[in-house]
């Protein structure tokens, strides 16, 4: 699964459209906050896509940050050193698609949610809230295969009806607290 990370806005939409036009099946894109404010990730289900990361964008993610590792998701992390970032993709270093303590590892050795592989057999393609993490993460199924977990930004939960992370007060149960009033 390839991953494209770059600054949002028109460029994001234009690159996403380019991959759709080329016939690459696109899973979607998600905003990322925390150490990567105002960035977006496009996840592609086509394994032939390489990870494309604009170096100026990656450098911006480490500016002013102490040296160390920063979470990207269950499949990658950033190593920041002296303001310069290096994205480590677990599949690129010959390991499984999960990390454990900022090392790539076999999923069976990693705790939830990254070590929890979901059975997508017979499940429609889509993104699903992971109720075992109180909906602070979600997973993707496509063609009966599990494509991993993604995390919502801090304080948000996954809203299946909108296909995005949202405030709990705006998400219906079981993930949120939104109360539906009939007729409204």
Image: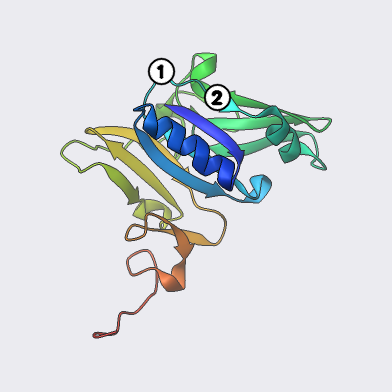
Residue found at x 42% / y 28%: 107
Q: Nearer the viewer, residue 103 or 184?
A: 184
Give the label, 1 or 2, closer to the camera.
1
Q: Are marks 1 and 2 in contact (CB under 8 Å)?
A: no
Category of crowding for the residue at label 1, using alpha-carbon neighbours closer than 10 angstroms: few (below 14), some (14–19), many (at least 20):
few
* Residue 153, visible in the rendered structure: yes
Q: Nearer the viewer, residue 162 or 147?
A: 162
Task: State the separation of the CA atoms marked 1 and 2.
Answer: 15 Å
Residue found at x 59% / y 46%: 8
Q: Nearer the viewer, residue 168 or 52?
A: 52
Is 130 placed above or below 16 here?
Answer: below
Secondary structure under tag 2 reads: strand
Q: Which mark is residue 48?
A: 1
Category of crowding for the residue at label 2, using alpha-carbon neighbours closer than 10 angstroms: few (below 14), some (14–19), many (at least 20):
many
Is 129 placed above or below 95 here?
Answer: below
| Residue named by callout 2 | 89
Q: Is residue 158 left or right of residue 121?
A: right
């Amino acid at each position: 699964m390839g991953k494209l990370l770059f600054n949002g806005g028109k460029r994001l939409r234009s690159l996403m459209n380019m991959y759709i036009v080329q016939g690459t099946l696109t899973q979607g894109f998600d905003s990322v906050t925390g150490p990567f404010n105002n960035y977006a990730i496009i996840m592609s289900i086509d394994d032939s896509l390489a990870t494309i990361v604009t170096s100026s964008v990656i450098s911006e993610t480490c500016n002013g940050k102490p040296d160390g590792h920063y979470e990207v998701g269950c499949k990658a992390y950033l190593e920041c050193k002296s303001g310069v970032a290096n994205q480590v993709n677990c599949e690129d270093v010959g390991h499984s698609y999960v990390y454990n303590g900022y090392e790539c590892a076999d999923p069976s050795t990693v705790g939830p949610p990254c070590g929890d592989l979901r059975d997508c057999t017979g499940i429609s393609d889509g993104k699903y809230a992971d109720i075992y993490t109180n909906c602070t993460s979600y997973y993707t199924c496509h063609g009966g295969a599990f494509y991993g977990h993604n995390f919502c930004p801090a304080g948000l939960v996954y809203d299946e009806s909108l296909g995005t992370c949202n405030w709990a007060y705006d998400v219906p149960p079981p993930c949120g607290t939104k109360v539906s009033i009939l007729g409204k």
